[in-house]
Image (spheres, rainbow, N blue to C red):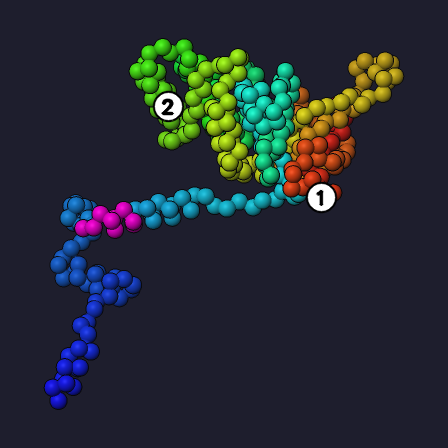
Amino acid sequence: MAIDSGLQELTHKLHRSRRSGPTAKKKAKSDKKKRNVTEEEKKQNPKAFAFSSTVKAKRLQSRASEKEQRRLHVPTIDRSTGEPAPFVGKSLLIKSLVKHYTKHNLPEVRGPITIVSGKQRRLQFVECPNDINGMIDAAKYADLALLLIDGSYGFEMETFEFLNILQVHGFPKVMGVLTHLDKFKDVKKLKKTKQRLKHRFWTEIYDGAKLFYLSGLIHGKYHKREIHNLARFISVMKFHSLSWRVSHPYILVDRFEDVTPPEKVEANSKCDRNVTLYGYLRGCNLKRGSKMHIAGVGDYNVAGITGLADPCPLPSAAKRRDCVTRKSCSMHL
């Protein structure tokens, strides 16, 4: 009998009240009513109803921030077909970056330059002129803007103007690059200047925006290690497609040709011209006969569209014959 009673005592479990779920919520609500605790009292004295465990508070705070970020970053529908067009960046470091990726020296920058930066990524560099019209055009097509900032002088008015233009056009990715840091002879002054410019850059973009430092020039070129770090960040950066660009077809023209018959031009120098534009089609599909706006020129009808072989194919798509992402458009001007 003593053994049986001992077994009964060992197998008996105490009642455990629920800590989560609807039953626990009802119990907590009834307990508050019994103690006469109202929502107004909780607002008046929030510290009395704070978490007793800092670990639990931190965990709930991180979960709430994750839910908020998941709500903000709604997945977008990718309507592109075939291989994606190369990402477009605006930079004055084109010669150094092209040398890093292709191991070839670029004597002169003329128009957009397309390179293969990896197995699944291509980049297209476009140099933006220092005028308001060029900045507006760059803000419309750029996926990444590299802002070159003279460290010895600081931010110029053109930099803030370009950032305001980017905000209007959807604000693509922005990376800052500080140059002319070799002019500082005092180490403390250089460190303070870096901190001041970094926080000013964060004020304009967001806290934690990437800012690179290029210490100086060696034989007319930037340090290989600094260019390597910059190119690495560009190669692995993720670009979020802007909604307006995804829903509208547009082409960044690499080159154009005037295909008007010469005898027609000789007879009348002011006759209608036929111009062929070459470039990668971005966004959605472009239909024949639709109107296309040329920046600074006007609206014109598209006479025809032709799919061409990709002049700069990806290594993974080189073996496939159906990879066609480049388009040529004929327009009546």
Q: Residues within 10 Å of mark 1 (few under 14, many from 20)?
A: few
Tag 1: amino acid: Arg
The quarter of the image holding the N terminus is bottom left
Give the quarter of the image for residue 255: top right
Q: Which residues are magenta?
A: 52-60
Does 248 sit left or right of 306 as displayed? left
Q: Main secondary structure of the magenta part?
A: helix
Residue at position x 48%, y 24% in the image: 225
Does 206 sit left or right of 8 as displayed? right
Can residue 156 be seen in the rendering of this structure?
A: no
296 versus 55 height, above or below = above
Q: Are marks 2 and 1 in contact (CB under 8 Å)?
A: no
| Residue with the mark numbered 1 | 320
Residue 301 among magenta residues = no
Tag 2: amino acid: Lys
Give the quarter of the image for residue 310: top right
Instruction: Compare residues 174 and 40 and report the one nearer the observer.
Output: 174
| Residue with the mark numbered 2 | 198
Q: Residues within 10 Å of mark 2 (few under 14, many from 20)?
A: some
96 versus 35 height, above or below = above
Q: Position of residue 263 (x, y in %)?
A: 88, 17
Residue at position x 47%, y 28% in the image: 229
Farthest bottom residue in view = 1
Q: CA distance from mark 2 to mark 1?
A: 46 Å
Residue at position x 43%, y 21% in the image: 213
